Image: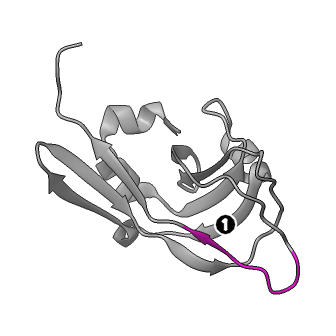
Amino acid sequence: MFTKLVIKQNGYQYLKDNVTVAHLCKNPSAADSLATIQSKSIATTPLAGTDVSFSESGNDLLVTINGKSGIDPSGVAASTDDIQVVYCSASEVLVSVDANDRDIANEDGDTVDIPAAQIYVREISAV
């Protein structure tokens, strides 16, 4: 899991304002460019700002990103791959969250679901 610097600098409103797609990727890295993430994607679905919501969770902020279902995969994965959902804008990688590592096939009629994501932005505390 990773958060790109643009999110750290601008907050999760930037994600809400700019997200356009979720990629189910195998073995993504925080250093990966958008083109590399796209090449590692095994399923892709469009997203909009309305798919991102904010709520209070105690003293923390809970960012929820809606899941999507019935997506036709474009690639395969093995249970040994590190599978993550990577959220991107049209021009940059924004944030990644962990997904269940599992075998994913790409046969006729196969579909995958991208689960909803919950990201907690914790209250500031001393290090």
Q: Main secondary structure of the magenta part?
A: loop
Residue 85 falls in which quadrant of the image?
A: bottom right
Tell me the quarter of the image containing the C terminus. Answer: top left
Q: Residues within 10 Å of mark 1 (few under 14, many from 20)?
A: many
Magenta stretch: residue 95 in it? no
Residue type, label 1:
Thr
Q: Is residue 15 above or below residue 2?
A: below
Tell which residue pokes out farthest to the top in this image. 127
Instruction: Report the front residue among 110 and 74.
Output: 110
Q: Position of residue 122 (x, y in %)?
A: 23, 36
Residue 77 falls in which quadrant of the image?
A: bottom right
Instruction: Report the front residue among 49 and 114.
Output: 114
Give the left or right position of residue 109, taking residue 65 as reference.
Answer: right
Give the left or right position of residue 88, taking residue 111 as reference.
Answer: left
Q: Residue at x 53, y 39 (%)?
A: 1
Q: Which residue is mark 1?
A: 44
The magenta segment: 107-114
Q: Residue at x 77, y 45 (%)?
A: 80
Q: Position of residue 116 (x, y in %)?
A: 45, 65
Q: Is residue 47 above or below residue 87?
A: below
Tell which residue pokes out farthest to the left in this image. 59
Q: Position of residue 52 (x, y in %)?
A: 35, 64
Q: Residue at x 50, y 69 (%)?
A: 47
Colouring scheme, one of rainbow, by chain, secondary structure, one colour: one colour
Instruction: Report the front residue among 48 and 57.
Output: 57
